[in-house]
Amino acid sequence: MAAPAAPAGLRIGLMGGSFNPPHSGHVAVARAAMRRLALDRLWLLVSPGNPLKSHHELARLDDRVAALQRLLPDRRMIASDLEARLGTRYTVDTLAALRRRFPSTRFVWVMGADGFAEMHCWRNWRDIAALAPIAVVDRPGWRFKALSSPVARTMARRRLDERLARRLPCAKPPAWTFLSTRLNPQSSTSIRRLRTT
């Protein structure tokens, strides 16, 4: 799959992950982001391999992209192998490449609260925050950990009230918001465990 189109001024969410396998929890986060941020598009970037996770049970990239696309309920949501095509392994490199390629597009990094709670372990997380605003979508059991995380504490003054979330794509980074939403308990880890029992 080639890089999706990103015309100047378009509000595009970027949601990365292993999606191993994709499930309704991913869709719930995607829907919340589309609606609450008033996005024009949402690109779901299927990682060739998360540097912080074991690749032992990782399904083929093409299979994960196809399975995710089948789940997505909106044509504006696009599952993509863009990171493999760009040759990037880390979010900071992916965002930098997209900023260079599409300098006038309004990108927002979309992630679950579970990822945000651990974002301080990511490579150059401060540079990530400087490259794009961040929307954090609540996940079961992760709200407190996310909101008390090192990244949340460091960027406390840059937090946008979720009632103003539609402004986030136009906000100058670093900027972030936390989106409360109906929680979906599914996780890729629990699905894989069920398959092996």
Image: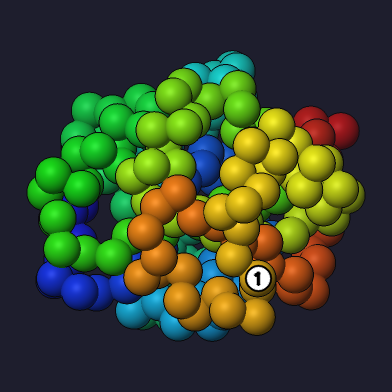
Give percent across and percent down for residue 174: 45, 49
Residue at 44% from the left image edge and 55% from the top image edge? 133
Horizontal side of residue 58 vs 38, given as left or right: right
The residue that label 1 is drawn on is 161
Residue at 60% from the left image edge and 33% from the top image edge? 119
Horizontal side of residue 59 vs 53, given as left or right: left
Give percent across and percent down for residue 147: 77, 48
The one of 18 and 182 positioned closer to us in this rendering: 182
Tell how many labels.
Answer: 1
Give percent across and percent down for residue 182: 79, 74
Indicate the colouring scheme: rainbow
The answer to which quarter of the image holds residue 161 is bottom right
Is 71 placed above or below 21 here? below
Residue at 20% from the left image edge and 74% from the top image edge? 9
Is 125 placed above or below 46 here? above
Give percent across and percent down for residue 1: 20, 52
The reply to whether residue 49 is in sight is no
The reply to whether residue 130 is in sight is yes
Horizontal side of residue 178 vs 17, given as left or right: right
Question: In the orientation shown, which residue stands out farthest toward the front?
Answer: 157
Horizontal side of residue 178 vs 184, given as left or right: left
Please rate how many residues cluster around mark 1, counting C-alpha atoms within 10 Å: few if below 14, some from 14 to 19, many from 20. Answer: few
Residue at 20% from the left image edge and 48% from the top image edge? 99
Is 112 placed above or below 36 here? above
Where disc 1 sits, the SS reads: loop
Image quarter hosting the C terminus:
top right
- The amino acid marked with disc number 1 is Asp
